[in-house]
Every structure is written in structure tokens, then in C-alpha cells.
Image (spheres, helix red, strand yellow):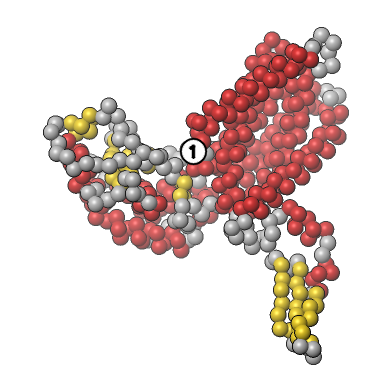
Amino acid sequence: MAEIVAEECRGYPSRQKNVFVLQNNRLTKFKNGRRKHYGFGNFFNEVFFPEGYPDTVSKDYLGYQIFDTIQAFCSSVNGTIATQSIMQGLGVGEEATTALAATMTWVLKDGVGMIGRIVFAWAQGSDLDCDLKRWRLRADILNDVAMFLDVCSPSFGHYFVYIVCLSALLKAVVGIAGVGTRPAIIQHQARRNNIGDVAAKDSSQETLVNLAALMTSLFLMPLLNRSPWYSWTAFFLLAFIHIFANYCAVRALSMETFNQSRFHLAVNNFFSSGYTFVPSVGTVNSREPVIFSLFRPWKLEIGSRIPKQHLTGDEYQALRSLYDKEVYSLYVNDLGGKIYIFLSQTATQEDVMRAAFEGELVAYRLGARKGYPQLDLMRQARLDLDDLFARFQKLAQAEGWDFSCNYFGVKEWRVTWRNAPISTDHVTIM
């Protein structure tokens, strides 16, 4: 009996498996019995899922993609209803309407949307991946609002142009938010340096969903045209499913990297447990707010410029004495409820994480020890920092948290303190 000397398989569970035996001094290949079971399901997986699925993607991949598919389908069908309403508002089918007037309105709408995309990308582009769950949910809510305006627009004849331009502005926000947050999600899902494959298969899934929505729309539109009530009922039903599916999709995401919200939740659990416990990735993600901002008595501003206010000579000397050998420094602004973290030019990713941890430690103790001298509290935090941060990092990594990168929304300002003597009572920041 020939002895098997090697086997090869592709994917897990193995969709294709071969074994090799040594016969007549040559390796001979035999196909495993699994090969004959190759059917439509296997073909579908190969076409629409990343190679090696599920081993090559994150554990939350399937849950997120299911809800993302549902929301994309509902949004596409509602988009067809909205497009029909815009056509009616443009006067398609009416003798009094000229092609030039309709074209000018459409071009104006598109132009407003283009300007909106540029402005929104300039204003919020750097914050999208830092808070991607809330931005994706916000964007899809705005998308439904924009389509609602489109559906309403034919009823407001003289204001039609203004309404569709407002809708275009909202859709501009939706487009930029989607483009800005999707790369971070794909990077999270890809686990074998296969970002390109995950992105390509995501595009294929989206195309398939849009095709299905197109076929559904071709069937539905003649039925919905029988009565405005049919259209409105279908629109609100699909909008509700769309928003709910989006909420479930962002809730399905379980990010192992820290943004400020997840870091705040994890670190404060660590402090309140007596420095012995860090919650798991799933627990923190389930507590992360996806609609409203996380309430925090003290907000960290990392990579900040020096605030535009009077900084006393004593405060300056305190900063110099506390952080003389550090690549960052902290300044607590009692009036603004902010803790500014100034970074030097040489600050690394690990320094940023350490600085954020110290900021959270100071903020926690400011709340727990009200009335305690602020400078003394910061000195004590400095003394405890090394031990507490090392303990937190060890516990967090054991729970699956990734410290190789973060999404803290670090600004690009860098501060270098000079050793010049203070000649006045105040350092004035202009």
C-alpha cells in the first residue's frame, strides 16, 4: 500500500485538497473526496469572499457584511424612488419643460454637491477614521434625509432647485464619510496582508447587491406608481430597515485598536478595578457609543498647539520641571475642561499612547480627588505612570488589544520648550 508523503489544501474548511504518494520513485497526486462536492456554494464563496475565508478576515467580517448588504439593498431601492421624484420635479414628460432647463438644474445640483464634498473633506477628513462607527451611522441617516428631500421636492415647485441642492449637499457628506471610513474597516478586516482582496470582494458584493436592488426596483416601480401612498409606505419602511441595519452593522464591528472613546472606557475600567482588570475588545466595543458622543468631564487634545491664553511663569516652570526629560507634556485647562497634550518632534506612536494614558490618569484623579492640589496630583501621576502603564499594557494585550497603532485623532502641532529664562510674569500666546 502506497504511503501518503504530502498533502496540499486550499482554504479552510478545505474546498480543494490533494494528497501525494510515492510510486515508482515519483510523486503521484490524488484528488481528495472533497473535490467532488464542489458546487454553487463553493463557487459563490470564491467569487464574493476573500481568498482563504474565513481564516483571512476578522471574526466580525460576516456579521458586518450581512447587515451592510441589507442596508445597501434598501438604500439602492430608495434611491430609485428618489430619482423618480427628481425626474418628476424636472418636468420629465411635460410639454412645457425644456431639456435645457432640466439640464441646468441637474448641473447646478451636481455642482453644489461637488463643492460640498470639498468643504466637508477639508473640515472633517482627519476625524473620520478616528470615529468611524458614528460617522458611518450619521452618514446613512443623512442619506435617508437627503432621499426624503428628493421625494418631497416635486411638491414644492418654486423651491425645487433649492431642495435638490440641499439634498446634494447632504449626499456629499454621505459620500465623503463613506470613502473616509471604509479603508479603516477594510484594514481591520484584512488579516493576511490582503487589503486589496478584501476591498475588491467588498466591491463585488456591493455590485451584486445593487444589481439585485435594480431588478427589484424594475418590479416595484410600476406597482408603487399606482398610488403616492404606496411610494411613501415603501420609502419609510425601507428607510427604517436601512437605518436599523446600519446600526447593527456598526455594532457588529469589534475594533482591536483604540480610538479615544474605546481607550477612555478601557482605561477607566482599569482604574476603577484597582489596576487589576482591562475589559475585553468585545465588551468595550459593545459599550462604545455609536449615536452620540461619549460624555467625558475632561477631553484630551493630543498634538495640540499651545492654547491662546495667558500661561503664567509658574505654570511654565511646572511644565518644565515635570516633563523635562519627556517627549510630551500635559497642561490642564480648568475653564475649558480640556487636557492639552503637547508633543515634541521626536514623539513616537508609543509616546502618544503613553501620553494619552497619563492624560486619562490625571483626568480620573481630578474627578476622584476634588480639591486636591492639581500640581501635586500631576506629580503623583508622574511617579505612578511607569508601573501603571506597563500593567495596563500587559493586561490589555492579553485581552487582544492592539498597541501597534491608534486612532486618537492626533493633531500635527509639535511644541519644543526652550531653556531660556523667564523675564516676565506671564508668557503671552498671541
Identify the secondary structure beneath mark 1. helix
- Where is residue 356? Give x, y as percent: 36, 48
Q: Residue at x 77, y 21 (%)?
A: 87
Q: Residue furthest left?
A: 423
* Near-viewer residue (423 or 71): 423
The vertical placement of 397 against 341, above or below, is below
Q: How many marks?
A: 1
Q: Residue furthest bottom?
A: 1
Q: For residue 27, which quarter of the picture?
A: bottom right
Residue 127 shows in this picture: yes
- Does residue 157 appear left or right of residue 314 in this picture? right
Q: Quadrant of the C terminus?
A: top left
Q: Quadrant of the N terminus?
A: bottom right
The residue beneath circle 1 is 127
Q: Residue at x 30, y 49 (%)?
A: 327
- Where is residue 231? Give x, y as percent: 78, 27
- Does residue 339 appear left or right of residue 201 in this picture? left
* Near-viewer residue (371 or 314): 314
- Does residue 240 appear left or right of residue 380 in this picture? right
Residue 137 shows in this picture: no
- Where is residue 105? Give x, y as percent: 70, 16
Within-10-Å neighbours for mark 1: few <14, some 14–19, many 20+: some
* Near-viewer residue (248 or 4): 4
Q: Amino acid at mark 1?
A: Asp
Q: Residue at x 39, y 40 (%)?
A: 412
- Where is residue 40? Give x, y as percent: 83, 58
Q: For residue 419, which quarter of the picture?
A: top left
The vertical placement of 357 against 429, above or below, is below
